[in-house]
C-alpha cells in the first residue's frame, strides 16, 4: 500500500466517524441515546486494522481537541476532555486498536464473527475500562473521598446494552463492505 | 461553520494560544488543589464573570456547549448527594463546570490555525526521533476538507431512506456511507500521487 493511500484511508475514516454523528440517535427505553459514532470507532478497527484504525481515531479525537465540533450533537473543543465522560473519548483510539488487533488475529474465522468478537473486545471491554477509569478518576479528584471502581461501573452500565447493538452492527457492516469491496477490509487483505 | 472559535473578536482572541493552553492546565491543577467550598465557589464566579464580560456571543456559545451536559451533572451530583452528602456533590459539580468553562473559553477564542501551530510546535522535538509532521498536516487538511462532503452525503442517504421506509435508519446506511468514503480515499490517494505525492516528505 502506498503512503498516500495509507494517509487517505486514515483521514477519510476520521471524517466518516464525524459524519456518522449526524445519524439520529436511537433511544434506549430508559432514555440513554445510542449514536452511530462509536460504531464508526469499532468499524475503523475492524476495517483498517489495529495500527491504521488507531491512527484514524486518534486523528478524529485530536481534531475534536483542537476545536472542531465533530462529536455527535456538534460537540467538540477542549471542554470535552474536562467532562465526566472524557475517559470514553480518550479511549476511542484504544478501542479501535483492540478491535483491529483481535480481528487480525482471527483472520481464519468468518468475517461477521471475527468483527463481532473484535468490536466486543475493543469497543466494549477496552473502551469501558478507559471510560470507567476516567469517570472514577474525575470523581475521586473532584470529591477527595474514595469511591470504588464498582460504583463507577454501576453508573456506566446503563450504556452497555446500546453498545452491544453496535457490536452486532459492526459485524454486519464489516460483512457488507467485505462483500461489496473485499480489498477495502484491510484486516483481510 | 466547521470550527467552534467565534468570529466576533474578544480581548481573549489576542492572547497567544500557547499562553491560553498553559493557563488552562495550571488552572485545572489549581481548581483540584482548592479544597474549601468557598474557594471553589469563588473560582466558579470569577470564571462566570469573565464569560459574561466577554459579551453575548461567547455567553450564548458557552450555554450551547454546556447545556447538553446538565442532565449528567444533575444525575451525578444527585447520586453523590444521596449516597455521600450534599456538600461534596456541590464541590464536584462546581469544579467540573468551572473547568469546563475555562476549557471552552480557550476553544471559543482560539482560531483553528493557531491551535494547529501549537500542535506542530509541540510535535517538533519528536521529529528528531523520526516522527514526520508533513503527513500529519496533510491528514488534518484532508479531514477538514472531507467532513462537509461526507456530512452532506449522510444527509442525502438519510433523506433517501426516509423516502423508502417508515422505520428509523441506523446501521443500514452506515455500510454505503463507509464504502463511499473509502472510494473517495482511493481517488484522493491517486490524485495525490499524480501530483507528486509525499515523496521525500
Image (cartoon, coloured by chain):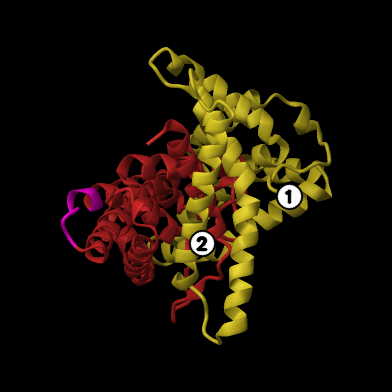
Q: Which chain is yellow?
A: B
Percent of width and height locating residue B10: 81, 36
Percent of width and height locating residue A141: 41, 43
Q: Residue furthest front?
A: B194
The residue stretch that appears in magenta? A103-109
The answer to whether residue B40 of the structure is visible from this angle is: no
Lower sequence index among marks 2 and 1: 1
Residue at (34%, 64%) from the top-left corner? A179
Provide the secondary structure element on which disc 1 rests.
loop
- Which chain hosts label 1? B
In the depicted view, which residue is nearer to us: A153 or B114? B114
Q: CA distance from mark 2 to mark 1?
A: 22 Å
- Which chain hosts label 2? B
- Whether tag 2 and tag 1 are in contact, CB under 8 A, the answer is no
Q: Residue furthest top?
A: B128
Q: Residue furthest left?
A: A108
Residue at (27%, 51%) from the top-left corner? A188
In the depicted view, which residue is nearer to us: A186 or A90? A186
Decide: is B70 above or below A13: below
Relative placement, left or right, of B101 versus B167 is right
In the depicted view, which residue is nearer to us: B92 or A133? A133
Q: Which chain is red?
A: A
Residue B158 position by quadrant = bottom right
Decide: is B89 above or below A173: above
The answer to whether residue A36 of the structure is visible from this angle is: yes
Residue B110 position by quadrant = top right
Residue at (62%, 58%) from the top-left corner? B151
Instruction: Identify the residue under disc 2.
Output: B177
Residue B22 position by quadrant = top right
In the depicted view, which residue is nearer to us: B94 or B180? B180
Instruction: Identify the residue under disc 1.
Output: B1
| Mark 2 or mark 1, whichever is nearer to me | 2
Amino acid at each position: 500500500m502506498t503512503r498516500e493511500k495509507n494517509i487517505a484511508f486514515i483521514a477519510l475514516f476520521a471524517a466518516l466517524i464525524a459524519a456518522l454523528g449526524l445519524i439520529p440517535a436511537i433511544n434506549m427505553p430508559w432514555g440513554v441515546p445510542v449514536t452511530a459514532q462509536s460504531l464508526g470507532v469499532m468499524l475503523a478497527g475492524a476495517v483498517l486494522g489495529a495500527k491504521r484504525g488507531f491512527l484514524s481515531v486518534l486523528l478524529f479525537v485530536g481534531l475534536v481537541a483542537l476545536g472542531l465540533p465533530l462529536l455527535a450533537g456538534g460537540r467538540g473543543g477542549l471542554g470535552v476532555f474536562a467532562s465526566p465522560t472524557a475517559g470514553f473519548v480518550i479511549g476511542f483510539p484504544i478501542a479501535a486498536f483492540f478491535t483491529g488487533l483481535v480481528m487480525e488475529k482471527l483472520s481464519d474465522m468468518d468475517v461477521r464473527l471475527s468483527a463481532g468478537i473484535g468490536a466486543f473486545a475493543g469497543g466494549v471491554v477496552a473502551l469501558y475500562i478507559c471510560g470507567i477509569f476516567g469517570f472514577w478518576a474525575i470523581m475521586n479528584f473532584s470529591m477527595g473521598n474514595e469511591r470504588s471502581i464498582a460504583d463507577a461501573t454501576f453508573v456506566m452500565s446503563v450504556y452497555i446494552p446500546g453498545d452491544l447493538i453496535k457490536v452486532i452492527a459492526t459485524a454486519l457492516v464489516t460483512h457488507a463492505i467485505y462483500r461489496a469491496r473485499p480489498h477495502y477490509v484491510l484486516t483481510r487483505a | 461553520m466547521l470550527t467552534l472559535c467565534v468570529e466576533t473578536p474578544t480581548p481573549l482572541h489576542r492572547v497567544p494560544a500557547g499562553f491560553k493552553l498553559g493557563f488552562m492546565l495550571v488552572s485545572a491543577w489549581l481548581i483540584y488543589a482548592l479544597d474549601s467550598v468557598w474557594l471553589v465557589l469563588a473560582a466558579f464566579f470569577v470564571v462566570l464573570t469573565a464569560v459574561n464580560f466577554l459579551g453575548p456571543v461567547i455567553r450564548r456559545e458557552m450555554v450551547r456547549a454546556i447545556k447538553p451536559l446538565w442532565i449528567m451533572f444533575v444525575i451525578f451530583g444527585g447520586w453523590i448527594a444521596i449516597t455521600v452528602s450534599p456538600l461534596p456533590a456541590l464541590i464536584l459539580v462546581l469544579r467540573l463546570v468551572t473547568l469546563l468553562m475555562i476549557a471552552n473559553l480557550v476553544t471559543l477564542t482560539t482560531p483553528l490555525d493557531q491551535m494547529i501551530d501549537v500542535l506542530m510546535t509541540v510535535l517538533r522535538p519528536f521529529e528528531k526521533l523520526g516522527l514526520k509532521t508533513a503527513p500529519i498536516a496533510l491528514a488534518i487538511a484532508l479531514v477538514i476538507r472531507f467532513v462537509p462532503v461526507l456530512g452532506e452525503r449522510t444527509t442525502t442517504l438519510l433523506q433517501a431512506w426516509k423516502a423508502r421506509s417508515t422505520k428509523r435508519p441506523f446501521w443500514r446506511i452506515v455500510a454505503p456511507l463507509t464504502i463511499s468514503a473509502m472510494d473517495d480515499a482511493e481517488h484522493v490517494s491517486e490524485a495525490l500521487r499524480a501530483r507528486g505525492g509525499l515523496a521525500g516528505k
